Image (cartoon, coloured by chain):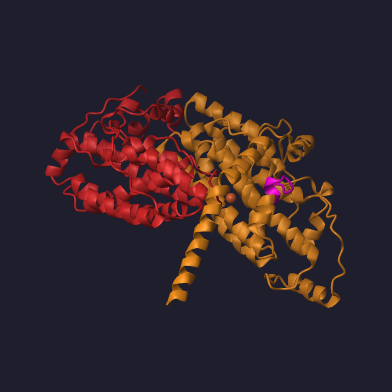
């Protein structure tokens, strides 16, 4: 099968943005499986990856249903190329060290938790149902990555040095979480999606609480990278998809 | 099996055990009672168990690597989720088994150190590469299948914590086996290329899977003692035969050919008789010369070394917390 073109109505686009962010982040987390600093973390990072993968699957299935072109979750995940992916850039950055993985997980889940909490009140019943499950999972992700952020920030000189490096690398990708374009605004107006401006205070509060305890400075908001949600990605996503989509591309049209 | 390197002579010193305690211990074993961590046990029993349980644990942990190799390339989201969950289960098995070994007075750190320094063994099977997606099917079907054959009797092994760990593990392994078989079935019902992929994987995994049960009984030094203590309940050869008998019809159902020209059904005994196993290959793999021995150990060592700063930070943070709590109490 060649690359597919999706009809991106505002709802389909919004679902793809959420699904792609969950899938791409899940994929990065799954790269740790068997290589984590301790067995407990092999299991915990796999749990996070599985939760996000489950969210992505529910969102793709719903997006395919809304699009109404008879596609499946796998068509959406495996047959779109990088420019059609709609995830935030932060999710696709390479795995990095454990500090980077933890901090990325924390920044994303500190956003996801209030986002899904608000989305449980969506006027779209299907999205509200997905949110009800995702909210509980995100609460656990905030707890797990938040505890590690504190341990590593206030651990040894080495762990602190690594956390500061991760923070410097990741912070400029945090702005994209709170963007709203025309499609988002249409969904916000219809009560389908929460307004990112209303998510931001909860995100700030979680970040401040955990960073204070981790003795990490909250960086100033300088230049912020953008583009992932409209398909302009880093160099890394193409490599990730080349690996992830390998079998579907090499043996088109098969069932697995 | 996951503990196949046990089949070598125990060179440890023979301790003179208290005759009364030994008699009571053996009476318990004969009565099918479980031995628990605080019970007296002969030193050789403890040593055998530590070695067997830790080899089993190491095999679970090293076993995460060949399958982990396909997590990022799983062909569908459903398969990706199932594979992550499976590899995660294997990590969980490693954890319970290390915990069971710890009840015998060794620490997880010591055991991991033995693995990373090359003093401890793990199952030879995990030194083979996973080259195509069909290998993930074959590992579930054959490797988890062989593991179940060996481990179901271990649910009744004489040492309580090991037996209980095995009960939980066996449930998950049989789920893995069904899942692996289902991958094979999907491939065999798929395109010609998919079916060829399945046959190629079977060709590569069949003989290594038979080797998982360890050397033939005649060459296995430990079997007799382990059988008497009910650590082991069936011999290597008996388990291997049971595995072949169960697996051959499954391969036929898939429409695959077992890569053994000597394989034939023996009407009289009701067993599938198989050809000679290349024990030289087995010895070479155990000696470190399998296709992936070096990579597997390097991957484990790298994870351990690169994770050292994380473990140190966790300890340092916990110590800081304790110190702060103590200072707070002192100030009140
Ligand atoms: Fe296992
Ligand atoms: Fe398994």
Q: Residue at x 47, y 36 (%)?
A: B72
Residue B54 or B113: which is nearer the viewer? B113
Note whether residue B174 is visible.
no
Q: State the image coordinates of residue B321 (x, y, percent, origin top left).
A: 47, 64
Residue B40 or A178: which is nearer the viewer? A178
Figure quadrant of residue B98 = bottom right
What is the residue that sits farthest to the top in this orientation? A2
What is the residue that sits farthest to the front in this orientation? B331
Figure quadrant of residue B277 = top right
**Chain in orange colour:** B
Q: State the image coordinates of residue B317 (x, y, percent, origin top left).
A: 49, 58
Location of residue B231 with respect to A237 vertically, above or below: below
Figure quadrant of residue B62 = top right
Q: State the image coordinates of residue B163 (x, y, percent, origin top left).
A: 64, 63
Which image quarter holds the C terminus of chain B? bottom left
Q: Residue at x 46, y 42 (%)?
A: A30
On whether residue B118 falls in the magenta region, the answer is yes
Note whether residue B235 is visible.
yes
Task: Determine whether, in the image, residue A26 is placed left or right of residue B256.
Answer: left
Task: Determine whether, in the image, residue A65 is placed left or right of residue B153.
Answer: left
Q: Which residues are magenta?
A: B114-122
On whether residue A77 falls in the magenta region, the answer is no
Q: State the image coordinates of residue B102 (x, y, percent, origin top left).
A: 65, 62
Chain A palette colour: red
């Amino acid at each position: 099968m060649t690359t597919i073109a999706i009809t991106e109505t505002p709802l389909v686009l919004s679902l793809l943005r959420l699904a792609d962010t969950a899938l791409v982040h899940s994929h990065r987390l799954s790269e740790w499986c068997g290589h984590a600093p301790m067995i407990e973390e092999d299991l915990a990072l796999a749990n996070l990856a599985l939760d996000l993968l489950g969210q992505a699957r529910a969102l793709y299935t719903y997006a395919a249903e809304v699009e109404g072109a008879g596609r499946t979750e796998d068509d959406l995940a495996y047959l779109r190329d990088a420019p059609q992916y709609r995830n935030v850039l932060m999710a696709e950055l390479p795995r990095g060290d454990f500090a980077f993985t933890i901090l990325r997980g924390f920044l994303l889940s500190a956003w996801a938790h209030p986002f899904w909490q608000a989305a449980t009140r969506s006027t779209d019943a299907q999205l509200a149902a997905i949110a009800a499950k995702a909210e509980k999972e995100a609460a656990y992700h905030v707890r797990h990555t938040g505890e590690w952020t504190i341990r590593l920030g206030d651990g040894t000189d080495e762990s602190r040095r690594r956390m500061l490096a991760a923070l410097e690398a990741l912070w400029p990708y945090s702005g994209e979480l709170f963007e709203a374009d025309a499609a988002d605004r249409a969904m916000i107006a219809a009560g389908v999606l929460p307004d990112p401006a209303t998510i931001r205070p909860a995100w700030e509060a979680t970040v401040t609480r955990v960073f204070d305890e981790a003795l990490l400075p909250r960086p100033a908001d300088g230049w912020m990278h953008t583009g992932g949600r409209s398909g302009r990605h880093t160099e890394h996503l193409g490599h990730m998809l080349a690996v992830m989509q390998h079998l579907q591309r090499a043996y088109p049209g098969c069932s697995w | 099996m996951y503990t196949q390197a046990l089949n070598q002579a125990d060179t440890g010193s023979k301790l003179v055990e208290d005759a009364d305690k030994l008699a009571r211990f053996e009476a318990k074993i004969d009565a099918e009672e479980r031995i628990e961590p605080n019970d007296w046990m002969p030193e050789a029993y403890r040593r055998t168990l530590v070695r067997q349980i830790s080899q089993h644990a190491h095999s679970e942990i090293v076993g995460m690597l060949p399958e982990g190799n396909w997590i990022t390339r799983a062909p569908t989201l459903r398969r990706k989720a199932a594979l992550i969950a499976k590899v995660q289960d294997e990590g969980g098995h490693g954890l319970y088994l290390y915990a069971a070994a710890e009840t015998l007075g060794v620490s997880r750190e010591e055991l991991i150190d033995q693995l990373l320094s090359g003093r401890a063994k793990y199952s030879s099977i995990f030194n083979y590469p996973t080259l195509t997606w069909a290998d993930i099917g074959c590992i579930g079907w054959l490797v988890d299948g062989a593991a179940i054959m060996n481990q179901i009797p271990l649910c009744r092994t004489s040492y309580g914590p090991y037996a209980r760990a095995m009960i939980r593990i066996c449930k998950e392994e049989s789920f893995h086996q069904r899942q692996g078989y289902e991958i094979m079935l999907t491939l065999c019902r798929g395109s010609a290329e998919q079916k060829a992929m399945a046959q190629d994987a079977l060709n590569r995994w069949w003989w290594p899977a038979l080797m998982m049960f360890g050397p033939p009984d005649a060459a296995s030094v430990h079997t007799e003692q382990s059988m008497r203590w009910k650590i082991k309940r069936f011999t290597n050869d008996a388990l291997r035969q049971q595995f072949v008998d169960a697996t051959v019809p499954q391969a036929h159902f898939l429409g695959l050919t077992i890569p053994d020209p000597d394989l034939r059904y023996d009407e009289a005994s009701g067993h599938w008789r198989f050809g000679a196993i290349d024990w030289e290959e087995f010895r070479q793999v155990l000696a470190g010369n399998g296709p992936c021995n070096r990579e597997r150990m390097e991957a484990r060592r790298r994870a351990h070394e690169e994770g050292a700063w994380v473990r140190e930070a966790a300890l340092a943070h916990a110590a800081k917390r304790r110190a702060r709590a103590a200072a707070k109490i002192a100030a009140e």
